[in-house]
Image (cartoon, coloured by chain):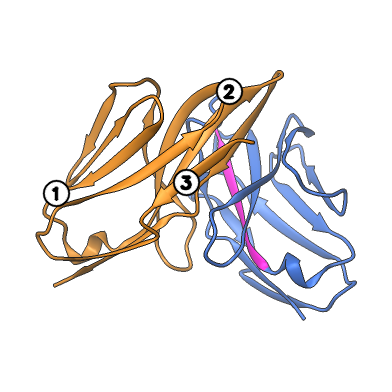
Chain colours: A orange, B blue
Amino acid sequence: EDQVTQSPEALRLQEGESSSLNCSYTVSGLRGLFWYRQDPGKGPEFLFTLYSAGEEKEKERLKATLTKKESFLHITAPKPEDSATYLCAVGLTQGGSEKLVFGKGTKLTVNP
Amino acid sequence: DAGVTQSPTHLIKTRGQQVTLRCSPKSGHDTVSWYQQALGQGPQFIFQYYEEEERQRGNFPDRFSGHQFPNYSSELNVNALLLGDSALYLCASSPPGRWPETQYFGPGTRLLVL
């Protein structure tokens, strides 16, 4: 069964305290790995797409990396406005059809 | 340019009833995908429409059905509601041929089934 697991479930950081979120997956037919940010009561907002092991993408204080079995979202010197739930999703191609499987997310809280 | 819009924002129904949720995609987008997000969970893919037909479907029963109109807007219908159908229902739109790499989500419709 295709699985996407995110850890930790919740993370509390002090402003400026760097850390990483993990997304591990056991799937076949990987088409791409996607990171989203979701604020309370809102729809997910796209952050990054990664396609192959070794690929890295950066945006402001966020950097996403990909290996064959997992992805990391590194947050450097976070600010309170980075507080949100971060979702990882894996795009698959299986038997001619496509699927998108999300993890449960990591809820990040950054305290001033 | 308006983003993805959904209506209504909130809805309360009782078990056994039927519900219709609506979605208008971003301008230029022809593909609409629907997701169910239970509290504390990630979104689960329900199905996807383009060219007015259902093209992909997740593991959801036939009680969940949809429709896409010529202007690319879409509806999600759920029949015989169960308590477990309580969730945030998200619609996402994508440009032609760009799902899942590119999709923009709407704010969702929060459905409560009593």
Q: Residue at x 65, y 66 (%)?
A: B87
Q: Nearer the viewer, mark 3 or mark 2?
A: 3
In the image, the segment drawn in magenta is B87-94
Picture disc at residue A5: 3
* In the displayed structure image, the side of residue A3 where residue B66 appears, left or right: right
Q: Nearer the viewer, mark 3 or mark 1?
A: 3
Q: Chain of mark 1?
A: A
* In the displayed structure image, the side of residue A17 where residue B6 appears, left or right: right
> Could you say where residue A3 lies in the image, as x and y percent from the top left?
56, 40
Q: Residue at x 17, y 44 (%)?
A: A60
> Could you say where residue B101 lies in the image, as x and y percent from the top left?
48, 30
- Can marks 1 and 2 be said to lie on one chain? no
Alpha carbon of mark 1 to alpha carbon of mark 2: how far?
34 Å
Q: Secondary structure at mark 1?
A: loop
Picture disc at residue B97: 2
Q: Chain of mark 2?
A: B
Picture disc at residue A7: none
Q: Secondary structure at mark 3?
A: strand
CA neighbours of label 1 inside 10 A, class few (<14), some (14 to 19), many (20+) = some
Residue under label 1, please give it: A76
* In the displayed structure image, the side of residue B5 where residue B3 appears, left or right: left
- Can marks 3 and 2 be said to lie on one chain? no
Q: Is residue B38 above or below residue B98?
A: below
Amino acid of disc 3: Thr
Q: As rendered, which of B67 and A79 lies closer to the eye?
A: A79
Q: Chain of mark 3?
A: A
Amino acid of disc 1: Thr
> Could you say where residue A65 lies in the image, as x and y percent from the top left?
28, 32
A36 in the magenta segment: no
Amino acid of disc 2: Gly
Alpha carbon of mark 3 to alpha carbon of mark 2: how far?
28 Å
Q: Residue at x 14, y 49 (%)?
A: A76
